[in-house]
Image (spheres, rainbow, N blue to C red):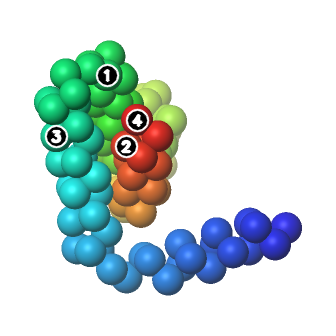
Amino acid sequence: QSAARLVQRVSDRLVPFFYIRWVTFLALVVSLTARVVLLESHFFTTYLLAIYILNQVFLFLSPATDDDDLPVAGTSGEYRPFVRALSEFKLWCKGSLATLAA
């Protein structure tokens, strides 16, 4: 309970710092790339990380709705805003944690 509350508090404080978060993620990716190039190993791990991050980006770019069916009568002119399947903050969190784990 206490650990979950601490994680929520830290993540709430990180949300407004968009550019700092993504620069930190870029620094993590660059450091992992440098490590792989210098050690000349862990290629498979890096390949899996790239596939995972690409999957998360696709989730970020796709809508959250599952209704790909034909439009139902009476709802054809209805405005529905674009809701992402994965938020930007969760994309950053998952990408950063996966990069740290790799």
Marks 4 and 2: CB-CB under 8 Å? Answer: yes
Q: Nearer the viewer, mark 2 or mark 3?
A: 3
Q: Residue at x 29, y 27 (%)?
A: 46
- Horizontally, residue 91 falls left or right of residue 41, namely right
Corner quadrant of residue 79: bottom left
The three-letter amino acid code for the residue at tag 4 is Ala
Task: Name the N-terminal-most of marks 4 and 3.
Answer: 3
Of residues 11 and 66, the one nearer the viewer is: 11
Q: Residue at x 39, y 52 (%)?
A: 96
The residue that label 3 is drawn on is 34
In percent of width and height, residue 1 lies at 85, 67
Q: What separation in Å lies between label 3 and label 1 (alpha carbons)?
A: 11 Å
The three-letter amino acid code for the residue at tag 3 is Ala
Q: What separation in Å lies between label 2 and label 3 (alpha carbons)?
A: 13 Å
The residue that label 1 is drawn on is 42
The residue that label 2 is drawn on is 99
Q: What separation in Å lies between label 4 and label 2 (alpha carbons)?
A: 5 Å
The residue that label 4 is drawn on is 102
At mark 4, the secondary structure is: loop
- Horizontally, residue 91 falls left or right of residue 5, namely left
